[in-house]
Structure formats: C-alpha cells, structure tokens
Image: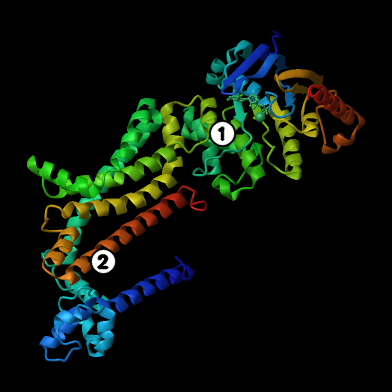
Amino acid sequence: MNIRGIIPALVVVGVIFAIWTAAVIPMNAHLTADQAQRDGLVMTPEAPRDRQDFTGLTLAIKNPAIIPLTYTLTRPRLPSPHQVAIEMYETIFTKAPTSRRSLVYHGWVTLSATLLGFVIGTTLGVLLAVGIVYNRTMDKSVMPWAITSQTIPILALAPMIIVMLGAIGIQGLLPKSIISAYLSFFPVVVGMVKGLRSPDGMQLDLLRTYSANANQGFWKLRLPASMPYLFASLKIGISAALVGAIVGELPTGARAGFGARMLVGDQYGQPMVTWAALFGAAITAALLVAILSWIERRTLTRMGMGATA
Amino acid sequence: MNSTSVISAKNLNLTFETNDGPVHALKDVSLDIKKGEFVSFIGPSGCGKTTFLRCIAGLETPTSGDISVNGMTPDEARKARAYGYVFQAAGLYPWRTIGGNISLPLEIMGFSKAEQRERVNRVMDLVDLGGFEKRFPWQLSGGMQQRASIARALAFDADILLMDEPFGALDEIVRDHLNEQLLKLWARTEKTIAFVTHSIPEAVYLSTKIVVMSPRPGRITDVIDSPLPKDRPLDIRDSAEFIEISHRVRDGLRAGHVDD
Ligand SMILES: Nc1ncnc2c1ncn2[C@@H]1O[C@H](COP(=O)(O)OP(=O)(O)O)[C@@H](O)[C@H]1O
Ligand SMILES: [Mg+2]
C-alpha cells in the first residue's frame, strides 16, 4: 500500500479516536464525581441523587475539576484509549504467553478454533460448490438450504451447538470450530459456485473441440478461473470464522479465549479487559485478512492475473 | 459425395426451439468443401454462419440432413482431431502464458512434454509470435492474442481450420495485416479453411469460394468460385476482377434481403 492509500485510513482512525476520547468525559462523569466526592472534593450538586438529573456533559461543565479524572478511573464505564493501550501492553508483552492473564494466550485459544473452523468451512464450501456446479440435483437442493442456514441467528444457534456437543462429550476446540465453519462455509460456497461457473460458453466450447473430459475441464479451466472468486470469499470467510469462534465462547462461560475475556471483563466490572479483548480480536481479524490478501496477490501475480485483480 | 470433399453437407436443417417459438437457423443447406479450399461464409448476422460452423465441429446437432467431415460424422471427426476451431474472441486463459495457452490442446490430447515444446515453437513461428512464449495474454495486443489463438488451433496438426469471425473485433489495419498472414499460412500449410466474416473485402480477398447466406430461415443464396490467383498481394483489391466479385457478393446479400 502506498502513502496515499494510508492517509485516508489514518484520518478515519484519528477521527474515531478523537470521538472516543471526547466521549470518555460525559460517559464517566457521574462515576468520577462520586469518586471525587469520596476523596474530599466538593461537587455541585452535592447529593449524588441530584446529580443523576444531569447529563454527563452538564455535570462535567459544572465541575471542570473532574474532567481530567474521568480518564483515570480504575473501573470506568468507558475506558480511555490510553487505559486500553496500557491493558493491552501489559497483557500482551509483560505476561508469559502461557499464562491465563496473557492476552496472547487467550488470542491463541480463539485463533486455533478460528483456523480449524475456517479450514473445515472452506473445505466443505469448496466441495459443496463443486457438487452444485457439476450436479443438477445438488444445485436444486443444496443452495436453498445453504441460504436458509444463514438466516438462523448464530446467537440462537451457538448455545444449542455447544450444549448438544457437550452432552455427547465433545468440548473445547471443536464445538467452537463448528460454529466458525458454519459461518465461513457460506461465502466460500457462493464465491466458488460463481467462480467455477465464470468460464463462458466459448471457453467451454473450446474444450469440447479438444474432446476434453470433465476432469480436464475442472482442473484446466474451471478451477483456475475460480481463483479470484475464491480469495474474495476466503477473506470474508476468515473474518466470519473469527466471529464464530468468539460467539462460541460466549454462551457457556468459556474460561479462555477472546470471548471469555469479554465476558469476564463485563461480569467483574473490568471494562479494560473487555476492551482489550475486543481490540485483540479486531487486530487478529485484520492480520488474518492481510495475510490472505498477501497470499492472494502472490498467487494471482504468479498466475498472470495480478494485473487484472 | 465427391471423393476429395473434406466437408460435405446435404439438406442440412437446424431448428432451435426457443421460448419465442422455433428459430429456423439453417434451411436446406447443401455444400461441398474440397481439400485445400479457403471458403468464406458471408451474410447478415443471424443467417446461421456460426450455426453451420458449429455443425461441422459437432458442437451443434442438425435437426435433419447429413453432414460429414473427412468422411466421418462430426463427432468422430472431432475425436480424430480433424479440425481446429478459432472463435471470435481469442479466449486465451489469462493464467497461462502464451506458450501455455498454445500447449493447452496438446496437454489435453496427451502429447509428451518434449513434443509439446517442439510443436509450440513451430506454430508460434508460423504466426510470427516467436519470442513471446513466456508472456501473459494481457501483455499482448488484440491482434497478437488472436494470432496466438490461431497458433493454438494449429498446434495439433488438424487439416481443417474453422474460423468464426476471428478478426471481427480488430481494427482495419491490423485486420489487413492478419489477412495477408493468414493467406501465407494457408499457402504454406495447405489446410482447408472455413472462415466466417461479414466483411465483403475480407471474404473476397481471402477465399477460393464465397458462400453467401441470408437469414430467416438461414440458407445459402449464392456460391461464388473466385477466379483470383492463389498469390494475392493486398493491392489485388483494386483490380477489376476483385471489384466484380465484390459486386456479385453484394448483389447476393441484397437479394437475400428482399423480404425485409
Ligand atoms: N443456442 C441457440 N439457441 C437458440 N437460438 C439460437 C442459438 N444459436 C443461434 N440461434 C439463433 O439462430 C440464428 C442463427 O444464429 P447464428 O448462427 O449465430 O448466426 P450468425 O453467426 O450468422 O450471426 C439466429 O437467429 C440465432 O438467434
Ligand atoms: Mg456468428
């Protein structure tokens, strides 16, 4: 990416951080005022009850002294960017990656489920797509079900999958991977069906004039033609797989993974933990997509399609 | 049927059943093409030129009538690698180099690696693309891509070349150049060529026989044997004979249009 491509992205990030930083003041004003009063400062109005009648913003304007303090609460409603940064730094760099307090440890738990689910989902998706393209019955029967499957909210389905698999003794990585696979197979099916069908009538006729068989048609024409479509799908699929793994960690109160950290932070009033996990997940997703983009560029360039892709 | 007939069609009919009713794409088409002839098919679009070529190639099955290629059915002829087909678009695979594209039919037909290399080199020289073997299609001009697709059709040594408006999408100057090259190639290889076009000068310049067709139903309205010599420089197009044949083709095309 060149500098021109980076600048707009940086501007967007800057704006988001500015809004976030500004929002910390009103969001934390009440908590900060309570804390400041306990520490001996005089607040207006003095009764905590009366303060509830004011918005966070008004309260901060009436008590400008609390403004800097809103950024340093130990249990803020909205942590400030630097608090999240410190939490992330400490849990990523100062803890052994095997420790349960390390974000790297939790990240790996989620990532391994994500990758396993992604591999299962992609394999299933590609196989289904091949079936759909080569078999009329599958074309008629599988696609409607694939579409229907995606209309069921995953939040409703995830607990059922976890509980049912748990009942037959399957726990840990696999149930989460199945949810990941469930979310990631669909974009792969759709993309691959489109890709495998992308050769036009003329290209198929050309192979017929060589009396090529179906196998040759697949390996020499349909599969290579589908590569750009496959990569587009994989990038959507891997993000979906990560979401699936996290969702799979939420309903059962899993003890490890990004999802578990989000829950823990929420339940024990440690928003920094929740936010650090959230950012950890976002960074992981970005890295996964970046890796796929890199493989895509390399593959397509090597295939001579780099200029068009 | 003549013993030297390479392609022979008798009372060929083909009707497509479409949602808007039957389309009579070919009606009572009878034609003999002899070995080594260069036959052009000319006519307005929809008159069945492509359909006829596809019947020869066995890509389309006639509703009635007989067609034979090298004395075989089109399907048998295809399996015997009787023809190479050149489509209007070059249709090169973007993920294969030019050399890779030309060896595609050779791979499918099971030629050895060494033989593939040897043949690719030979046909690339034949269409003046020597040295471009490792390039990808997007690195070549449209005219060069179409030459590569002709090389691909020549690679497995079919005696017949079926060409469906191969230069239709190219500009006039490139087209002139390619026509000249195609004639040289034809003279050198002694192939039988069936060539679809809707350009009168192109048809007259290239052919030993011009088949004029007209639509609804698609049929042959005139077959002109060209008196032009086999050796044709580009400026033959200014000769009286050339102009006379062009007139006859134009008249044939107009006659087919009387009901419009
Ligand atoms: N596969 C098909 N299905 C239905 N109609 C077709 C099909 N192929 C060609 N036709 C029709 O047959 C007629 C002849 O088509 P074609 O041979 O392509 O004409 P030309 O090549 O001379 O322009 C046209 O009316 C066309 O619409
Ligand atoms: Mg046509």
Which residue is farthest right? B240
In this rendering, position of residue A242 left or right of residue A74:
right
Q: x, y percentage for residue A237?
A: 32, 49
C-alpha separation, residue under disc 1 versus residue under disc 2: 58 Å
> The residue under label 2 is which amino acid type?
Phe
Q: Quadrant of ligand 1?
A: top right
Can you say whether A152 is above or below B153 in the image? below
Q: Is residue A151 above or below residue A287?
A: above
Note whether ligand 2 is within 8 Å of mark 1.
no
Image quarter where the N terminus of chain A lies is bottom left
* Residue displayed at 54% across by 47% down: B136
The label number, if any, that marks residue A135 in the structure image: none
Name the element at disc 2. Answer: helix
Give the residue type at disc 1. Answer: Arg
- At x 62%, y 16%, the residue is B14
| Secondary element at image label 1 | helix
Q: Is residue B54 left or right of residue B244?
A: left
Res B252 → quadrant:
top right
Residue B161 placed where, x, y %? 65, 26
Is residue B71 among the parts visible in the rendering? no
Residue at horizontal 20%, vertical 56%? Answer: A110
State whether residue A60 appears in this view: yes
Q: Please, which chain is the residue tagged with disc 1 on?
A: B
- Residue beneath disc 1: B119
A52 to A187, vertically: above or below: below
Determine whether, in the image, residue A161 is placed left or right of residue B193.
Answer: left
Residue at left offset 22%, top offset 87%: A66
Residue ID for mark 2? A279
Q: Nearer the viewer, residue A105 or B131?
A: A105
Q: Position of residue B33 (x, y in %)?
A: 71, 17
